Image (tube, rainbow, N blue to C red):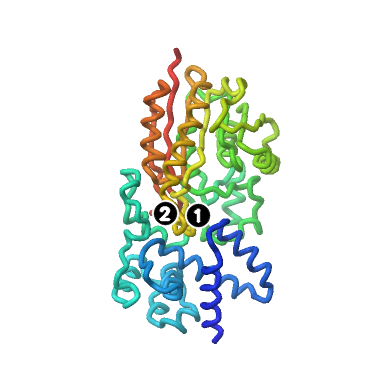
Amino acid sequence: MRFENQLRHAVRILDTYQGEMPLHAWLKDYFRLNRQMGSRDRKLLSALVYGYYRLGHAVRELSAEERCLAGLFFTSDQPNELLAYFNAEYNTRVGLPLADKVAFFQTQASGAGFRVTDVFPWKDQLSADIDHTAFCLSFLRQPDLFLRIRPGHEDPVRKKLDQAVFIPPFTLRLPNGTRVEDVLTPDREVVVQDYSSQRIAEFLRLSPAPQFFWDACAASGGKSILTYDLYPNLDITVSDIRQTILVNLRRRFAVAGIKKYHAFVVDLVRDYPPDAAANADLVIADVPCTGSGTWARTPEDLWFFDPAKIGQYADRQQRIVAHIAPRLAPGACLVYSTCSVFKKENEDMDAFIRDNFGLRKDRMENIKGYDLRGDTLFAARYVRDQR
């Protein structure tokens, strides 16, 4: 009866939640209002609900109960009592490789119509370099947690997290849910940052070293901290659309030890930045986007996504770049990046940038994280002629 109640409760949550806010935040509020649930119940209900969304747009004809159980089967690595109660065959196979789980699920009545490529149905809008099947499979596993070790903290951090997988030159990989804050100070010793985001460093490395850096869409400041760690003597300027964003960034910078920087509020969709930004010789525009390359972390976004938003974001991205590009100094570098897998936000934007602003493309890449249980990003670097 306990397991049946838990599954019914998960379905009730799915009936109530409508994607109005991030699922993790919604569940946090929900559990706050239902304090009778213990930590075990909260963890299991979260796994069932997230499992439902991890199937994306595949087997939509299944009942919510069947989707929850199938999702829990795919995302579990160890047997558990609830799976054993409802489907013993699922439970005995949770430790199989993902491909074997898919093959087994397709032999079951509930999975007979399952096609991996239905999980993410917009193949025709993907960047050409993205492996559609591999990307779809990534939704059936929980992504890992990645940390970037900050300069000077390599040895103590690795000793404290000796169970983590080290990826040179500065990345640690851990199971999602690892309580890093119990042993480390985030932003001082390490930065919680996906591996693909850390690889943006490859686009920021310049010779000679830049003197003035502008993070045009700074958000929480992760890429600014990354750039600071590459160039500690850099003159840093950050901007974003709301003052509250910059207030939160200020707190994070304080922990990170970044004391000397400039900040301003600007809506780059509508306005040009102030003249002070014109002196930057390195600019990063990590523009607002669909976030589709990160949906394995937030699978509810995959479920509720309206494809019409792709064009809406692309229009905003064009407007942002159109307000940044004229402010680039001769010889300056612009790094354009998204956490999207859609061609319209990536390669089509590359063509727009090259065709309209006289910028020379120096490097471009779809930074694929789906085989590493990480995010998938796009980045391109452009140089303004010295003339």
| Left or right: 373 as drawn, with respect to 234 | left
First in sequence: mark 2 or mark 1?
Answer: 1
Report if residue 302 is visible in the image: yes
- Quarter location, residue 107: bottom left
Q: Residue at x 67, y 29 (%)?
A: 262
Q: Looking at this view, name the residue that lies furthest to the front.
A: 308
Residue 309 placement (x, y as % from top left):
45, 46
Report if residue 233 is visible in the image: no
Amino acid on which disc 1 is placed: Arg
Q: Which residue is mark 1?
A: 173
Residue 223 placement (x, y as % from top left):
55, 39
* Residue 39 versus residue 163 in the image, above or below: below
Assign the N terminus to one quadrant of the image: bottom right
- Quarter location, residue 225: top right
Front-lying residue, 340 or 155: 340
Amino acid on which disc 2 is placed: Leu
Residue 30 placement (x, y as % from top left):
63, 67
Q: Residue at x 32, y 51 (%)?
A: 123
Q: Secondary structure at mark 1?
A: strand
Q: Which residue is mark 2?
A: 372
